[in-house]
Amino acid sequence: MINKNLTTILDRKKAILYLCSAYEAGSLTQSVEYLPFKQRVARSSRARPTNFMSLSSSQVQDTGLSRRQHEFESRWGRHLLSGKGFRIILKPFFCFPPLKLFNIVALLTFQPIFHTAAIICYSIALLGSTAVIFCRRVKISFVLTPALLGLLAQLIQLVSRWHDSGHLPVMGLFETQHFLALWVAAATIYFYLRYKIIQFLPAGLGFSLLALLFAGLGPMTIIPLTPAIDTPLFLIHVAASFAAYGLFGTAALAGAYQLVHFWSASDEQTIARVMDESLYLGFILFTFCMIAGSIWAYLEWGSYWTWKIKGLWSYLLWFYYAGVIHVRHRNWWLGKPVSLLAMGGFALVLFTYLGLGLLFKTSHPLL
Amino acid sequence: MTAAPDITERNNLALKLAGSFWRLLVSPSTFVAISLLWCLDLGVGSVTAYFNDPQFSAKMDAYPFKTWLQDIAPHNPQSTWVYILTGLTFLMVLSLFLCSINWFLKRRKKVRAMGEFLVHLGFLLVFSGFVVGAIWGSKQQGVGIPVNNETYQPEINAVLRLDHLKTLRGRSGHVLDTVSRMTLIDRHGKTTHGVVRLNHPLIQGAIVIYPRGSFKQISSAQLSGPFGRKLLRPGDRLSLNGNKEIILQKILQEGERSGFSLGPGIILLAVDQSLPHGRQISRHYLTPLSEQWCTATIFGRSITLTNFGYTEVGNYDIHKDPGIWLVLAGGLILGIGIVWALVRYFI
């Protein structure tokens, strides 16, 4: 009991210090909001009734964290909480004395298991898809089943983190890379199911696998969402943005395929179609992302346009892909030029997303 | 007899040239070429500017774009890329505009392609809104308004009143937010009440009030002397003996200067009303910075500055963007166009 209380106090102090230091550093000057707190309390109490020490309104206002965030910050700590669901499911089994030895399993957190599972599934699918290309005897189900399982593992992790944190988990390197991998894998499977082009599977799945491996470099902790960005516009902005990034990635892969001329003519046409669709859908989603982001910025900060580097590069991306969309069916640009443009565009996407997020001080930090 | 065909040929040639020029102007390839140059300029320029001065973008955001271009950028040689960007943006928009006109003239019957047209139109409206805001908009930063006071802001032609201010503090005493209840009265007398806090500005039409924290300002001074203790505000008079009185002329805030005097402090005037026009006898500066400077002898009486009275002042950024309606309308049309284009792509 004493330990729990001590942990509670320490964690609260950490939360307050985190907010205060962020406030002083200027990163929170445009991102802390308190007044919708009643709605947040109502929502969190509906979602999960608390059976432990609750916080007063003033305490919640003190840090700007939502009640739910306080709860998991104080009770379990960020990392362990992510395994809460897992522990609850397995608790009855581990209460049985002979199985207490296996409590070590319960210490393994919920989400890392699914992260690892997704990596394993995509690896198997990648090997399977490569095998299918070179050996006609291997069935496509050896690719699709693990790929779909990997997708499912990612979805479970996404929902689990969403449930734990109370917001769409797209904060920080780990979550955003996961989200990107999810979209690329989904797009790859969608294009396979639509066009039955097996050659495209290894690239798409390999891309997702790389993204997941790269995600492991970032901290797996759930980053509390500052209340100001907890709006439906945030969800539209980020979800549309990463869906677009995923499709731009698919377009770049298709572009790379087009540059390597060892496919049959019909396959090349299909790959061109995949690239076209990816570019078009990606651009449309990215436009939604820009519109939602601008309206959100206007409502929150009173300005739909700033000269911050992240915003500038986002517009750069939008104009770049607007250009690509305009010329993708023009005779002179068909084939190699459009493929190069798609690949170049994805390099810009990576710089805007990863380069700026990791190397620059931006309004969209990843670490 | 031979002149007529020459004129026709010349006309044909001129028409052909004009046609080619028009096709070049409305060609998507022209747009792409300009947009690639635009991207190159923006990419290289923004990264270079960031490395030279990480606050470059914040400084740009502090002014309306036209003011920045005219007054600030000429003193900063690293701003060249912004001039190029502006030129290329206008070229790009011109290309889009002509492309849209071309579409409307030649292919308007194809309703299926209306989505793309709406996207172009929406973007043009957004850009027009940006230009209007950049030219006729205004930005003021750090406007201080004491509680229960109002101030007229000529840039927005409106009166802003701060009705209530509450500072939210963390346990360690750090200020986390200031919640202000404000009233904005525009030139037509329209009154808007609203609560302003971080990430929640007061928006009335084109005017946006955004909070930037609060600070305490010295609003009164407590003096002690033969008259006991008195609290004076600037302009208040304190009668000492018959016609002799002292006036609190000015309060210097912390760090504020007035001649050789450095704030915090007060400037007192000793006045003898029996003299013609209430003649000023002497001027005294009292400051708590040093004990000996706390006290002054006025009309033979020792007067000491014992305390200050403080008022909380809200600090605000006030923006006016007359182009916002165009931007919002453009965004809406852009959104509709995108959905239309998406549906058309798959159906």
Image (cartoon, coloured by chain):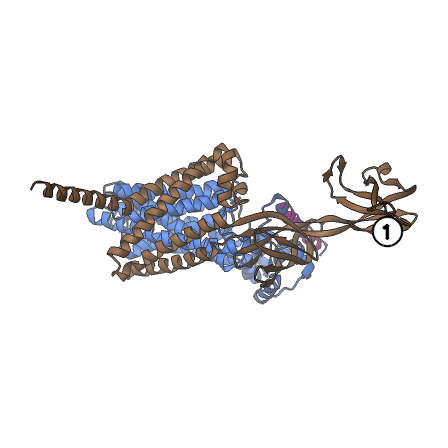
Chain colours: A blue, B brown
Image-quadrant location for residue B150: bottom right
The quadrant in which the N terminus of chain B is found is: top left
Q: For the view shown, which residue lies furthest in the front direction?
A: B276
Q: Quarter-wise, where is residue B37 in the image? A: top left
Is residue A30 something that shows in the picture?
yes
How many discs appear? 1
Residue at which label 1 appears: B230
Helix, strand or loop at mark 1: strand
In this view of the protein, which residue sits in the foreground, B120 or A81? B120
Q: Is residue B86 left or right of residue B2?
A: right
* Left-right relation of B254 to A332: right
Residue B146, given in percent of the width and then of the height, sits at: 70, 53
- Judged from this view, the residue extending furthest toward the left is B1
> Measured from the top left, where is residue B105 in percent x and y?
26, 56
Q: Foreground residue, A12 or A149?
A: A12
Q: Chain of mark 1?
A: B
Residue pictured at 62% horizontal, 51% vertical: B316
Look at label 1 and name its amino acid. Answer: Lys
Mainly helix, strand or loop, the magenta region?
helix
Please state, as top left, top right, bottom left or bottom right, where the C terminus of chain B lies in the image. bottom left
User: In this picture, which residue range is highlighted in magenta?
Assistant: A1-21
Q: Could you tell me residue B257's position as x and y percent?
A: 73, 38
